Amino acid sequence: MTLLTLFSSPKPFTDPHINIIQRNAIASWTKLDDVKVILLGDEEGEAEAARDLGVLHLPNVDVNEKGTPLISSMLNLAREHGNTPLLGIINADILVMNDITEASRRVHERLDKFVLLGQRWDLDITQPMVFDRDWQSHLREKAFAEGELHRPAGSDYFIFPRDCYTDIPDFAIGRAGWDNWFIYKARAEKWDVVDATPDVMIVHQNHDYRHLAGGQIHYSAPETKKNTEMAGGVVQTRYTILDATRQLRDGKITRPRPTSGRFWRGVEQFLRIVFFFLPEDKVERIVRPKRWKKILKKKFR
């Protein structure tokens, strides 16, 4: 039986650069053993890309009032059409290599309920990739030489057993908040949250945000605000890779190594518990004073 179904909802393929990096990413998924790939949505050029790359395309995903696909519908379709023990939602600009399937297999063999995630490497790629025999080693070398490891605030893939995340809010894909909630949900359900960064390299192909209104990143978009509300507020959307309870390192599942980021994240969580009786904005000023000053400075300058 195939191990993993990777599914995604890409952007329109109309922008030349977006077209290149999305085709690069999806092609990399098809090179993996034991993986089925599904594209979900009805964006312009999506059906043609799916046909060219030989992957399953399901256009009948539910969307919100803006026409943005809903993750709840994506998950339902992936379960229906991906008869695999593991499911993986992934952003359509992410290149992956064989280490992601090996990590998925190792964690699946040892844990029952879990979510596997990890930091990405940011890299400028502007041309179609050549998937020859050595493409993975070449990509690794290029990422180490020219790329940069992204901070642990963003998550670009989640791999989990098919019976996890069976009931989730109607989050809009491609807008902030839902990925943080995935981590919060796993922690609340006491599933293992496994940070695979030491063992798994994923590569994010850098791009701009011309596909969004005003060409601006989505953090202040109305759909992001709605995602945050459906998640239950900003506390639930504060969760990041720093909140992992396990780490995959050298093929072994261990406790995460101490870092300054994890230490201060622990302090923040403790203070939120201590000051639970205060309004959310006042708690924010206490636990994240530097960030609050930046917000005020930006607001009033």
Image: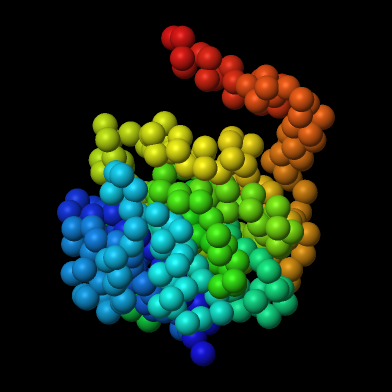
Q: Could you say which is closer to the camera, residue 31 or residue 219?
A: 219
What coloring was used for the rendering? rainbow
| Front-most of residues 40 and 242 | 40
Q: Position of residue 193 (x, y in %)?
A: 67, 59
Q: Position of residue 136 (x, y in %)?
A: 43, 72
**Residue 122 sits above or below residue 298 on the image:** below
In what quadrant of the picture does the C terminus appear? Answer: top left
Q: Is residue 132 left or right of residue 240?
A: left
Residue at left offset 51%, top offset 81%: 84
Whether residue 266 is visible to the viewer of this picture, yes or no, is yes
Name, please, the residue furthest toward the right. 274
Q: Position of residue 7 (x, y in %)?
A: 41, 68
Q: Which quadrant holds residue 54?
A: bottom left
- Residue lying furthest bottom in this view? 1
- Tag count: 0
Residue drawn 33% across and 34% down? 216
**Residue 250: image x %, image y %?**
69, 70
Residue lying farthest to the top in this orientation: 301
Q: Is residue 134 visible?
A: no
- In this view of the protein, which residue sits in the foreground, 67 or 258? 67
Q: Residue at x 45, y 67 (%)?
A: 76
Horizontal placement of 231 versus 249: left or right?
left
Residue drawn 33% across and 68% down? 39
| Residue 28 drawn above or below residue 147 | below
Query: Would you say 44 lies left or right of 78 here?
Result: left
